[in-house]
Amino acid sequence: MPSFIHKPRDFLAGLLFLVVGVGAFVVAQDYSFGTARRMGSGYFPTVLAGILAALGAILILLSLFGRRDAAEALALRPVLVVISGSLAFAFLLRPAGLVIAMITMVLIAAIGSRTAKLLPSLLLAGGLAAGSVVVFVWALGQPLPVWGSWFGS
Amino acid sequence: MDILSSLALGFATAFTLQNLLYCFLGCLLGTLVGVLPGIGPAATIAMLLPATFTLPAAPALIMMAGIYYGAQYGGSTTAILVNLPGEASSVVTTIDGYQMSQQGRAGVALATAAIGSFVAGSVATLVLALFAPPLAEMSLEFRAPDYFSLMVLGLIGSVILARGSFIKALAMIVFGLLVGLVGTDVNAPVRRFTFEIPELFDGIGIVPVAMGIFGLGEIILNLQHQESRAKVIGTITKLMPSREDLGRMAAPILRGSALGSFLGILPGGGALLASFAAYALEKKVARDPSRFGRGAIEGVAAPEAANNAGAQTSFIPLLTLGLPSNAIMALMAGAMMIQGVQPGPGVMKSQPALFWGLIASMWIGNLMLLILNLPLVGLWARLVRVPYDVLYPAIMVFCAIGVYSLSGSLVDLYLMIGFGALGYLFAKLGCDPAPFLLGMILGPFMEEYLRRAMLLSRGDPMVFVERPISATLLGLTAVAVLFILSPTFRARRDQALKE
C-alpha cells in the first residue's frame, strides 16, 4: 500500500463499493428510469447504485486521513485451497461423478491445513464420499450422479 | 382468539410426533454446532435449508428455530469448559464461566447456564405469545409508505452494533439491496443484472449466498487463524448449585431474561447484543463489581439467560412485521418464503397453527435442551476435541451437496463459491456481512413498497413524513443514526465489544 493511504482496509472496501456502484449504475441505464410517480425498472437500482458509489468514494476519501491502521494480512493458501477445491467439485461432479469429485475436493482442502496429514486425509475423503453416497443418494434420493458421464452413466 | 386457546392450539400442533421429532432434531443439531467451534447456527441453517424443502412448513421452521436457540445452550458449554466460545454470543460467558471451572466449579457453572437459559426461554416464549398478536394487529394498519419506513428503520437499526465504521455498514446494506434486485422485475418483463444467465432470472437465492459467506468464508478465516490450542477440559464434579448459588443467580437470570427479551425485539437485536448488554448490566448493579472476571456466578447466569431470550424474541419482528432483524432471521425469512409463507402479520391470521406451534415448540425445545445438556454435558464436552481438520472438509462437502441439490444447478455452486470468496474479503476489509444479507432479503420488498407509496402519493415524497406511522418510524431511524454517530456511544460500544 502506498504511504498516503492511512487506512488500507477502508480504502479497499471503498474501492470495492465504488467499483460495484459504478458498474451497477452503468448497467442500470439500460432499464427504463420512469418518473417518481411511475418508477421504471431502472429507478431503484440507479438510485441504490449511486448511493453505493458515493459511500465508496467517501470511504476512500476518509481513508487518506486520521490514525494509521495496519494492513490486514491476507492468507492466500486457505483462499486458494477452499475456492479451488470447491471449484474442482463443481467441474468434476457431472463428468466424473460424486465420488471422484468429492475425494478431489477433500484432498485439495486438506492442503489448506497446517496440521492435516496425507493418510488421515485420504481416509476422511473416502469416508465422506461413501457417507454422502449412502445418505444423500441412497437414503434421501438426491439426483446426484454417483459415477459421471466419463463412466458412461 | 385469546392467548390461552391460541397457546392450546400451539401445543396441540407442537405435540404431534413429527413436530416433536424435528424440534428435538433442531435442538440436538443446535447444541452440536454450539459446541463445535468454527461452525455457527447461520451456516448450519443454510446447509439444512435444502433438506427442509420436502417437509411441511411447521416442522421445517420448528427445526431451524431449534438450531438457533439450541446453539445458545451449546455455545456456553465450551465457553465454560475450555474458554472457547462456541458461538459469538457466548463470548462474555468465557470471562466468568471459565474462571468458575478453573476453581473446580465447572459443573455449577454449566448448571447455572442451563437453568438460566431455560428460565429465559420460558419467559421469552411468554413474551412472544403476549406481544406478537398486538404487534401484528397494529401492523395491519400499515400501508406501503409505512412499510418502506419500517424497512429503513430495520436496516439502519441492524447496524447499531455492526463492527467498524457506520459508512461501511451502510454501504453493505445498499450492496445487499442491489444484489436482492437481481432477476426479473416483478412489475415489468425486464431482467436486471442477470447477464443473460437463465439461472439468475429468478434472482439470487439466499442459500448459496449464506452458505458461501457463513460456510466457505468462515472456513477460510478459521484456516488462516488456525492454532493448536491446548484443550484442557475442566473436570465436572458437582452439578447441583448450592442453595447460596441459587439465591445468587435468581435475580441475574430474571434481569437477563427481561433485558434479553427486550433487546431481541429491537431491529439489529438478537442473542449477541443481549449477552453483552446483560453482562454490562450485572456489573453495573453488583455491589462488588471487582468479583466479575474472577468467577462470579452472576456473570454466567445473566448473559446466558439473555442470549437465549434474545434469540427467541428476535422472532417477533419477523413474524409480526415481516422484518428480519439479524442474519439468522434473514435465513428464516428465506426459509418461510421457500415454503410459500410470506413472513409478516399474515402468518398469524392465515396460519395460526404454524405460528402458535412454532412458539409452543420453543418452550418444549427449551425443556428438551435442559435434559439434553445437563446429564449429557460430559459427552458434549468431549466433542470439543474434534479436530478442525476433520470438520472443515465435512462442512465443505455438506455445502457443496446441499447447494447443488437445491435445484440441480451448477450456477448455484459457482454462486456459493463466489460469495465464499466475497465473504472472506468482507471479513478482511472489516465489513459485517449481516446487513448485506438483510438488504438482500428486503431489496425487492423495499422497491415494491417505494413504488406503491409513490404511486399513491402521485410522486410526492412528502407522503413518508405526512403519514403518522411512517413519520414516527423515520423519526426513530433518525434517533438511531444520531445514536450511532455520537462519539460517546461509539466509545462505549467499542469498549463493550472489546471486553
Image: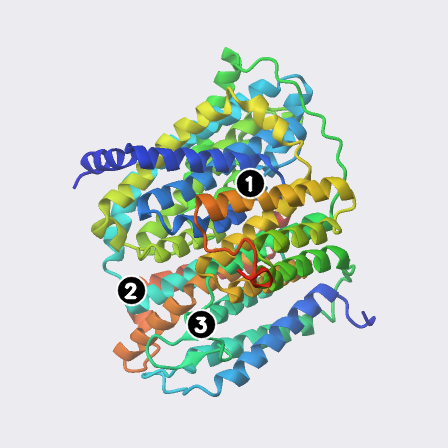
Badge number at residue A148: none
Whichever of callouts 2 and 3 sits on the residue coming sooner in the sequence is 3
**Residue that appears at 53% across and 65% down:** B410
Q: Around disc 1, counting alpha carbons within 10 Å, would you say few (fewer than 14), some (14 to 19), or many (20 or more)?
A: many
Rendering colour mode: rainbow
The local secondary structure at tag 2 comes to: helix
Q: Position of residue B240 (x, y in %)?
A: 52, 14
Whichever of callouts 2 and 1 sits on the residue coming sooner in the sequence is 1
Q: Mark 1 and mark 3: span between their CA atoms?
A: 32 Å
Q: Is residue B384 left or right of residue A131?
A: right
The N terminus of chain B appears in which quarter of the rendering? top left
Q: Is residue B361 left or right of residue B50?
A: left
Query: Residue reaching furthest front?
Result: A152
> Which amino acid is tagged 3?
Leu
Residue picked out by circle 3 = B181
Residue picked out by circle 1 = B89
Q: Position of residue B6 (x, y in %)?
A: 21, 38
Q: Position of residue B321 (x, y in %)?
A: 33, 55
Residue picked out by circle 2 = B468
